[in-house]
Amino acid sequence: MPRYTSPRRTASDARGTSSFYPDDSGRWEGTGTSVRVVVGAQFGDEAKGKITDFLAADARYVVRTGGGPNAGHSIHLPEGTVVLHQLACGVLRHGVVGISGPGMVLQPMKLEAELQDLEKRGLLRGQVVLSDRAHVLLPVHEIEDAWQDEMRAGKAPGASLGTTKSGIGPAYADRSGRFGIRMGDLARPARVKEALEILYATKTHLPNLPAKDDLAGELAEVGSRLAPLIQSTEPMLWDAIGRGENILLEGAQSALLDVDFGTYPFVTSSHPTSAGALVGSGIPPTEVDEVIGVSKAYSTRVGAGPFPTEDTGESGEYLRRVGGERGATTGRPRRCGWLDLVLLRYAARLNGFTSLAVTKVDVLGGLEEVPVCTHYQMPDGSTVRDVLPSDADDLLRAQPMYDRLPGWPAFHQRLKDRVRAEGASALPSTLRRYLDRITEETGVPVQYVGYGADRSETVALGFPSGPARRASLTPWTG
Ligand code: IMO
Ligand code: MG
């Protein structure tokens, strides 16, 4: 069957400088980007929100494709800091549609509070759309999440996952078990009542559940208020692709928290990979142009689970303090350590990164040396370079082996101003070498660098984007 080729327009077309051309077969092909996926390359909290917000300036649609209130995407606007949990960061920009997509589990009461907060602060500038296929995360799931983690801890030391307790695991389990309620159902109170009847029968072991009728009433009320926002989102996105509009898929969580490919069972319950972004939006793989992996210049993890490059000493404390490493959702201190190239290579292979965004390079500024883990030494004498041992216990036994790279100067305001004015060429040469080393080691060019929390503190490195450039080194022309 001939493949339907949608006419593509590029970001530059949108700005009026057309680069449309027909190829040999007479099909219209664009040269730029239409669908870009942003995914976390580590254990979450890589500043995906910051990078997505940066790229959203060029997008018409921004779609959150998975997770729910467990995510905390901090965006530092001139008006103050916003932490988005269930809304796509596109809602912060005029002319952008921010979609909470089909792959998400949405807690409608918290979602409404998030909307009201943005509205009150005058920051709700884009259009908000909630997928009718997204599942409803209920207060019941929050109770169940906390109950499960306590039960685990009671049965075996070290078995607690340290979830965000926002109900993610139970909500996805009920989705898979076909017990779920979807956002589109909220407009049908009789159906919600019936679904709660069945759902509650599966949860008789849980204490202190809200009364079914009260919950049904609350869902009907919040559902009627959110109703104008709840829509079918797939056709909207397919049509947008047809028109050549730019779409950004905003991942939450991260590759190493993927329920299948992460450090199971210390994972979340969704697929925070590029493949998961497609399932979570309904966009076919054939339409994706770029996959951007976001990694900090070092590593953090919040919650339990193996973390080979964790530094539990003074250096870890330094990173936590200077990097402000505290969970945006739970307020828990994040565990900190050094960049792990083994896991980054694994994430690159798993997600098919076409480029990397490296964030928080300013946090390491002023250090004499920066360690990076290049491989693991395993107890049996073998070396691991680019896979994740499938057993979390094996990862616990991995000995990370480090190279120590020269550090770069502190990011004082003067340096930040220069980078803002002159672009990537103003980045210190030792930092460039650090970024080049990441490219050499992963085969993925570093395309964006975050050098501060502020919205304006991201610099794009100048090279033509697209998969053809994979494996090339970063030319410093920006
Ligand atoms: P963003 O989108 C960091 C972690 C939790 C826990 C595990 C399972 O801000 O990067 P869950 O509540 O999902 O069942 O918890 O996953 N976790 C995150 N860690 N950033 C996140 O989101 C996370 N979402 C979940 O700490 O270890
Ligand atoms: Mg976060």
Image (cartoon, rainbow, N blue to C red):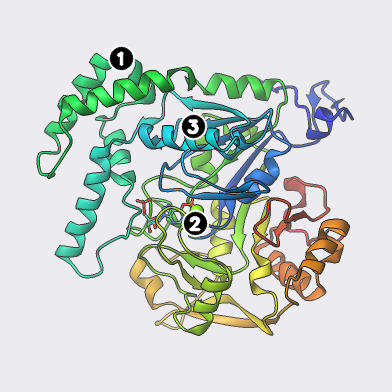
Please report the residue visible at 44 percent of the width from the left and 35 percent of the height from the top: 103
| Relative depth, front residue between 426 and 103 | 426
What label does residue 188 carry, if any?
1
Q: Which of 160 and 9 is in front in this view?
A: 160
- Callout in the foreground (1, 3): 1
Residue 414 visible, this orientation: yes
**SS category of the residue bearing label 3:** loop
Q: In this view, does 206 lie above or below 439?
A: above
**Labels 1 and 2: the sequence-earlier one:** 2
Q: Can residue 478 be seen in this view?
A: no
Q: What residue type is labelled 1?
A: Arg
Q: Earlier in the sequence, mark 3 or mark 2?
A: 2
Residue hosting label 3: 101
For label 2, the SS is loop
Tag on residue 211?
none
Asked if the residues shown at circle 1 and circle 3 are in contact, with their CB atoms under 8 angstroms apart, the answer is no
First in sequence: mark 1 vs mark 3: 3
Q: Is residue 40 left or right of residue 141?
A: right
Q: In this view, does 323 lie to the left or right of 354?
A: left
Give above or below for 359 relative to 31.
below
Label 1 SS: loop
Q: Name the residue under label 2.
A: 44
Residue that lies at the very extreme toward the left in this rendered image: 204
- Ligand 1 rendered quadrant: bottom left
220 or 105: nearer the viewer: 220
Q: Which amino acid does label 2 sit on?
A: Gly
> Could you tell me how far apart the alpha carbons at marks 1 and 2 are, in whole angstroms?
36 Å
Instruction: Report if the beta carbon of the residue with label 2 is closer than 8 angstroms to ligand 1.
Output: yes
